[in-house]
Image (tube, rainbow, N blue to C red):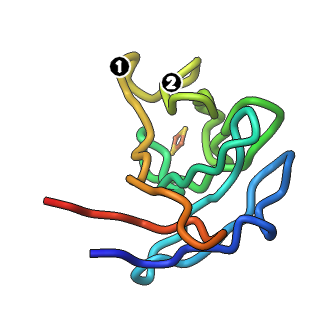
Amino acid sequence: MKVPLCPVAEIPDAGAKEITFFGRSVLVYKVDGRPRAIANVCLHLGGPLQCEGNTFVCAWHGAEFSCADGRRVKGPARSDARLMVLPTRVEDDVLTYVYEG
Ligand code: FES
């Protein structure tokens, strides 16, 4: 299954852009110039995330996660928590969700 998420040209070089994916909030952003997509759900109690520098910060209780790999940096989420990174690739200059299960 493939689902176009966002034209790469619309993904900011810094920060993140919120899009909707099957009714759920997803953040698209870049790490070292490469586009990525994560589910906009904190792994503590499901709060929304904001991109601050190289970190996603939860608006509810302040948990922080690395933008590079989604791992928890600090805060109330479990120490082994990791944000859900969507499997994607760029096709025709569009970041595309690709599921090949
Ligand atoms: S819901 Fe994100 S830190 Fe609590």
Instruction: Tell me residue 10's x, y (percent).
Output: 79, 70
* Residue at x 62% of width, y 59% of height: 27
Taking depth in this image into account, of 48 and 83 the one nearest to the observer is 83
* Residue at x 53% of width, y 68% of height: 91
Q: Circle 2 sits on which residue?
A: 72
**In the displayed structure, would residue 22 be above or below residue 67?**
below
Could you tell me which secondary element the residue under label 2 belongs to?
A: strand
Q: Quadrant of residue 53?
A: top right
Q: Amino acid at mark 1?
A: Asp
* Residue at x 61% of width, y 71% of height: 94
Could you tell me which secondary element the residue under label 1 belongs to?
A: loop
Q: What is the residue that sits farthest to the left in this orientation?
A: 101
Image quarter of the C terminus: bottom left
Mark 2 is surrounded, within 10 Å at the Cα level, by few (under 14), some (14 to 19) or many (20 or more) other residues, namely many
Report if the CB atoms under discs 2 and 1 are less than 8 Å apart: yes
Answer left or right for 26 relative to 1.
right
Q: Residue 18: which disc?
A: none
Answer left or right for 1 relative to 62.
left
Answer left or right for 50 relative to 60.
right
Instruction: Tell me residue 78's x, y (percent).
Output: 37, 23
Q: Amino acid at mark 2?
A: Arg
* Residue at x 80% of width, y 67% of height: 9
Image quarter of the N terminus: bottom left
Number of numbered discs overlaid on the protein picture: 2
Instruction: Tell me residue 17's x, y (percent).
Output: 74, 63
Instruction: Tell me residue 88's x, y (percent).
Output: 45, 56
Q: Quadrant of residue 8?
A: bottom right
Q: Earlier in the sequence, mark 2 or mark 1?
A: 2
Q: Circle 1 sits on which residue?
A: 80
Q: What is the residue that sits farthest to the front in this orientation?
A: 92
